[in-house]
Image (cartoon, rainbow, N blue to C red):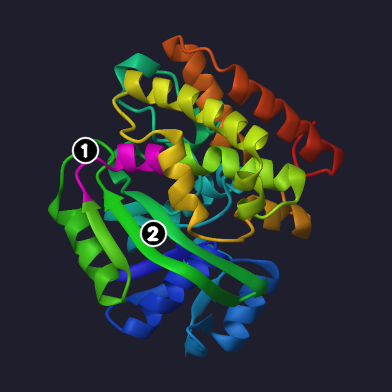
């Protein structure tokens, strides 16, 4: 199988290195700048469990140099996808699957959900540009349950978690996604082939839509966020609003917020990806985590005062630092 990683940062580099080392796929990368130079000079590099994994990397800045792929794994930040999507055309052949391994609500999420209407979610796909570049029929859904960091271009440090949930966005299971699941499992990932990946996306979002921006604003690790009763209660209120939205779009949440907090607390004193982005001066993915939820709430008639407040605070916080558009 020919696999191209688009966005060889922390998560993309983690997946790409593991696949390249496993030897069952021809793995390439669409990259640019320092990351491209590092991949071309040093190949794939991943530090995990006290050892460094490495493999040669075929990397290019132009998708035409890589040609059609069987699987394209998109691991760029949500803020960059609108600019990247039109460049992917040379990678897509008659049977190519495009699998975004990204945070938050993906551009395809509202497709076929009657309660959300036919218009693409403006918060994550303004004007439908991404949907126009990547046909829904090409998409495989993916949810990442792992933490990794890129201390320097082309070098990834895996921290915790091995989980990848994959599935058909329209629901059900398919042979094409099963082949992807088997490829990833062979590379050592903890893979679930889900019959309802849309709900899996929503469940992950339900947990990190509050933890990410709250940690970014406060600068606190998650243990400290959850230890403050007022902040914990505020996060719970936002999660109850998101759960109400989920009920109306077929993504019911079975847990109470406190149950999810207990699971998150077991992860200890960790710094969220958004907090890491703020500390590194990178753009933050507020639209995919909060803007999309607010937009969906408006479409299905669910009031979202806590989500609105968190979105407002987080975006002004980021705007002041030049990390979110004014």
* 79 in the magenta segment: no
For the record, the magenta segment spans: 194-205
* 203 in the magenta segment: yes
The answer to whether residue 194 is above or below residue 237 is below
Q: Secondary structure at mark 1?
A: loop
The x and y percentages for residue 8 are: 54, 67
Quarter of the image with the C terminus in it: top right
Closer to the chain start, of discs 2 and 1, is: 2
* Residue 8 can be seen, yes or no: no
The answer to whether residue 64 is above or below residue 315 is below
Q: Are marks 2 and 1 in contact (CB under 8 Å)?
A: no
10 Å neighbourhood of mark 1: few (<14), some, or many (≥20)? some
Mark drawn on residue 72: 2
Residue at 53% across / 20% down in the picture? 295
- Disc 1: which residue: 171
Residue at 44% across / 54% down in the picture? 101
Quarter location, residue 178:
bottom left
């Amino acid at each position: 199988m020919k696999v191209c990683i688009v966005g060889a940062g922390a998560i993309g580099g983690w997946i790409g290195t593991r696949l390249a080392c496993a030897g069952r796929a021809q793995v390439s990368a669409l990259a640019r700048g320092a990351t491209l130079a590092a991949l071309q000079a040093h190949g794939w590099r991943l530090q995990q469990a006290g050892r460094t994994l490495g493999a040669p990397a075929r990397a290019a800045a132009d998708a035409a140099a890589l040609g059609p792929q069987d699987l394209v794994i998109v691991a760029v930040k949500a803020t960059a996808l609108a600019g990247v999507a039109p460049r992917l055309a040379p990678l897509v052949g008659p049977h190519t699957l495009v699998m975004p391994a990204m945070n938050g609500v993906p551009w395809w999420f509202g497709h076929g959900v009657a309660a959300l209407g036919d218009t693409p979610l403006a918060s994550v796909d303004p004007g439908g540009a991404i949907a126009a570049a990547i046909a829904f029929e090409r998409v495989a859904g993916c949810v990442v349950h792992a933490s990794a960091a890129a201390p320097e271009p082309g070098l990834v440090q895996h921290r915790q978690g091995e989980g990848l949930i994959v599935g058909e966005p329209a629901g059900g299971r398919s042979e094409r996604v099963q082949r992807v699941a088997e490829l990833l499992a062979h590379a050592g990932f903890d893979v679930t082939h889900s019959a309802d990946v849309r709900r899996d996306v929503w469940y992950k979002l339900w947990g990190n839509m509050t933890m990410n921006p709250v940690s970014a604003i406060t600068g606190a690790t998650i243990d400290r966020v959850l230890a403050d009763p007022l902040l914990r209660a505020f996060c719970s209120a936002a999660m109850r609003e998101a759960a109400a939205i989920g009920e109306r779009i077929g993504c019911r949440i079975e847990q109470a917020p406190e149950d999810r907090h207990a699971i998150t607390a077991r992860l200890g004193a960790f710094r969220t990806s958004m907090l890491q982005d703020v500390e590194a001066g990178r753009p933050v993915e507020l639209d995919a985590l909060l803007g999309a939820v607010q937009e969906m709430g408006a479409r299905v008639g669910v009031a979202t005062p806590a989500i609105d407040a968190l979105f407002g605070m987080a975006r002004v916080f980021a705007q002041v630092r030049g990390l979110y558009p004014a």
